[in-house]
Amino acid sequence: MFDLINNLALGFSVAFSAQNLFFCLVGALVGTLVGVLPGVGTVATIAMLLPITFGLPPVGALIMLAGIYYGAQYGGSTTSILVNIPGEATSVVTTLDGFQMAKQGRAGKALAMAAIGSFIAGCFATILVAALGAPLTSVALLFGPTEYFSLMVLGLIFAVVLAKGSVVKALAMIAFGLLLAVVGSDLETGAGRMTFDLPELADGIGFANVAMGVFGFAEIIRNLEGSSEDRQLVQGKITGLMPTWEDLKSCFGAIARGTGIGSLLGILPGGGAVIASFAAYTFEKKMSKDPSQFGRGAIQGVAAPESANNAAAQTSFIPLLTLGIPPNAVMALMVGAMTIHGIVPGPQVMTKQPDLFWGMIASMWLGNLMLVVINLPLVGIWVQLLRVPYRLMYPSILVFCCIGIYSINNSPWDVVMAGVFGLVGYWLIKHDFEPAPMLLGFVLGPLMEENLRRAMLISRGSAAVFFTRPISAVLLAISALLLIVAVLPMIRKRREEVFVEES
Amino acid sequence: MGTIGVGNREMSDRIEEPQGARGRIRNAQDFWGGVVLIGLALIAFYASWDLPGMRGFSFGPGTTPRLFAGLLMLLGVVIAAIGLTTDGPAMPRFAIRGPLLVTSAILLFALMIRPLGLVVSSFLMFMFAASGSSETRWIETTFAAIALTAFCTILFVYMLGLPFQLWPRFTIGGTTIAF
């Protein structure tokens, strides 16, 4: 116990130096900017900024990179809430209730709650990382490809259950997303799959293209349908920038549960944070006294996933720092940064370079604090942005998004593809399909395939392995249970849920 | 350009089908949704037809596409079946103005960005996109376009340092004219 306090004290003394504070601030600012901007992704930014960090001392460089990472997570939620465009895969769920809240004039509350929830989750998760780093990694080691596959199946079922509408349609959207994810080159053989011999598709379809098109462009197309009274954007009816005590109290459970789910799932390398956000939302919806509010602007629907994805972002450092396994592409870049600075992540980091390890832990907390400090005052500015008349807003969004997408690969084809997905998104809206499950299927598709392949290889073609291994069996059982519970009401009576868009 | 049908939302999505019409699809929205999904699955099957499948217990490149396509097909069939057997909303009305405007604006940008550079493309795209709205006031729009273009340029190029060609660049014969 005393060890822990001593270590944390060491870490904070490192992190609170003026220089490191400055780096953290810069990182958080840049990260928020990157997260808010469409297309310009975290990976690209960190890759661009990596050379800048060469000249900085190692701790400072890593602190800045961590700040960028968290900033981007939060910035992604900002666009989800304000304009229904998810900046990151982990912010997709935030669009569901966050955007509804913005339409009702409660954007400030949504933004503030996202920041607060993230901060609380970050605090708790940081302590978890500090105290339980080593034991938690042993949990991660229990997960082999079979367990990962089953976990992802469970994650997809979560996405189905959280859907407002028909379960079958949500399943179909997941299948559609999975299919889209497969487009590109096969990992093992390099064969082109479903690319129709188009070189532009050889690398597959990017997340930004799909997200921007299906969420952003489709929304614009839909808003241009009718006359101005029809428009779903509420302008001029902004009620209160900050959440009230009532709001905070009602979200307490959501934040707590979200933090728990996120902390657990973040430890698993790969896909943990995305699944965490979907799982937290679904869990919250199930536990809520008034589940019909979810999808219509329930503030818990913002608090839970935001807490979850921030907790997952923190705990994803555990496999990185203790095992040296990066959980996602961004962390992989951090490993690269560490290596460049002469630090080899792994079990010895804790003992051989304690000031680095604990400095990073402390800086995580600091980064979260910095984000709250930066973003809460900014909420007012964001909310003012929503008052821009739509006739100026939608061309701005269009131009902005196109530039952002173009900046990924300097390829006009990317822009066209996003436009195509805009049409696809419009079709989905018209036929009452939901885009969120599709996006989850799209994000998890490659991972699922990889794990399925590996599991089948290891088990020598026996599909029974998914049911014989205990953890996997439990996960699949929960999935089946959830699915049945979701479908049951539909079988009994037709679920006539009033869809939000038509209210 | 106007939208097909009435702008009023309540009327447009609920077309009354004639009573007693033979072969009436009870839930057109779901039925056609399912049909399109089946079509997509078939396209996927066709595209991955010649990819090798499983070899022993090792997945080939064609296994997963066919697997997922099969899943989509199954679900598409279920949805279409629901469309035939239950009552639901009729065929949704697709507006023309929205999709056409947005798509052509995006295409315009994609065509312009390489030859004309960032500044000109952004400005022109903004003006074009704004022209589709009936509420546009031209002077205001022009100012907004200039402001946004300036903002984007400062943000993306100077602050973030992303490589963008700002101004038009023409190649005539062997000579390149760049601004």
Image (cartoon, rainbow, N blue to C red):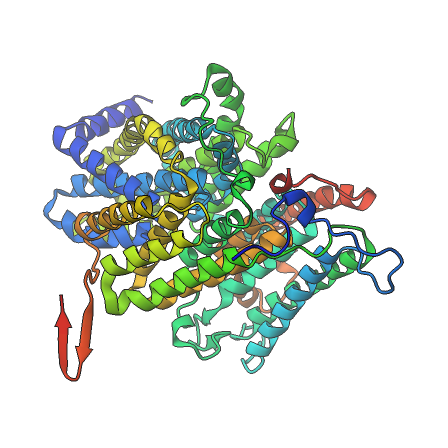
Number of numbered discs visible in the structure rendering? 0
Q: Where, by quadrant of the figure, is residue A163 drawn? A: top right
Q: In the depicted view, which residue is nearer to us: A238 or A193?
A: A238
- Whether residue B105 appears in this view of the structure is yes
Position of A466 relative to A166 (above/below):
below
Q: Residue furthest top?
A: A245
Rendered location of residue B39, percent (x, y): 64, 70
Q: Quadrant of the N terminus of chain A?
A: top left
Residue B45 located left or right of residue A316: right
Q: Residue furthest left?
A: A55
Q: Residue at x 67, y 49 (%)?
A: B12
Rendered location of residue A133, percent (x, y): 37, 37
Q: Quadrant of the C terminus of chain A?
A: top right
Q: In the depicted view, which residue is nearer to us: B61 or A215?
A: A215
Rendered location of residue A214, percent (x, y): 50, 54
Q: In the depicted view, which residue is nearer to us: A201 or A52?
A: A201
Residue A333 located left or right of residue A80: left
Q: Where, by quadrant of the figure, is residue A60 drawn? A: top left
Q: Residue at x 50, y 34 (%)?
A: A103
- Whether residue A268 appears in this view of the structure is no
Rendered location of residue B27, percent (x, y): 76, 55
